[in-house]
Image (cartoon, grey):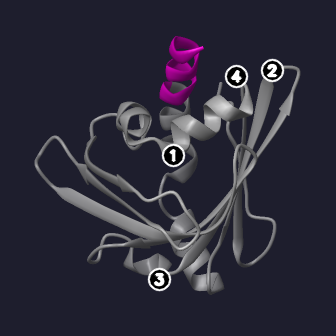
Amino acid sequence: MPQTQLTAPNDLEIVMVRDFDAPSALVFDAWTNCEHLKRWWGPPTWSLPGCEIDLRVGGEWRYLMRGEGGEEMGMYGEYLEIAAPSRLVSTENFDGEWFEPMGSGTVNTMLLEERDGRTTLTVTSVYKTKAARDGAMQFPMADGAEESFQRLDALLKELA
């Protein structure tokens, strides 16, 4: 049974919510540390051979994912706000035509709310247009997020 809730509360947003049995500082670190990201980010048959993070306001991030058939997908953005371990805001763009229907310049806000050692992750993605949001909804986003978050959950248990 999926633990990740995905909703589209309005024409421009997609919201994902998931609970983790880990403190917010550990979840934040797993989200912002390349060593950890390489172990959980992306589809299960893809790797993350490229990961660069300059974790400061105005700093940039870049991921390069590689599929088992050798196909590559790059994504990148800029950090707009950082309030570790509870808030991270960044832009998100994709190389090439991978996600052309979504446009570019999505703004993602990650909130981590800790209660009694458990953390609720809420990621709100704001798209520039309804068409871009609808394009994102065409991808199996909920399934992909759930698969990644299951791997993140396992990593958090290992790191605790």
Q: Which residue is mark 4?
A: 22
Proximity of marks 1 and 4: CB atoms separated by less than 8 Å: no
Q: What is the number of the mark on residue 103?
A: 3
Q: Residue at x 43, y 33 (%)?
A: 36
Q: Nearer the viewer, mark 3 or mark 1?
A: 1
Vertical side of 112 occupied by 62: above or below: below
Residue 2 visible to the viewer: no
Provide the residue span drawn in magenta.
Answer: 151-160
Cα–Cα span, label 3 and label 4: 34 Å
Proximity of marks 3 and 4: CB atoms separated by less than 8 Å: no
Residue 85 shown left or right of residue 157 in the figure: right
Q: Amino acid at mark 4?
A: Ala
Along the line of sight, which residue is nearer the eye, 154 or 81? 81
Q: State yes or no: residue 150 in magenta.
A: no
Q: Position of residue 95 (x, y in %)?
A: 29, 73
Q: Position of residue 53 (x, y in %)?
A: 41, 55
Q: Residue at x 62, y 40 (%)?
A: 28
Q: Which residue is mark 2?
A: 117
SS of the residue at dot 1?
A: helix
* Sequence-earlier tag: 1 or 2: 1
Q: State yes or no: residue 155 in magenta.
A: yes
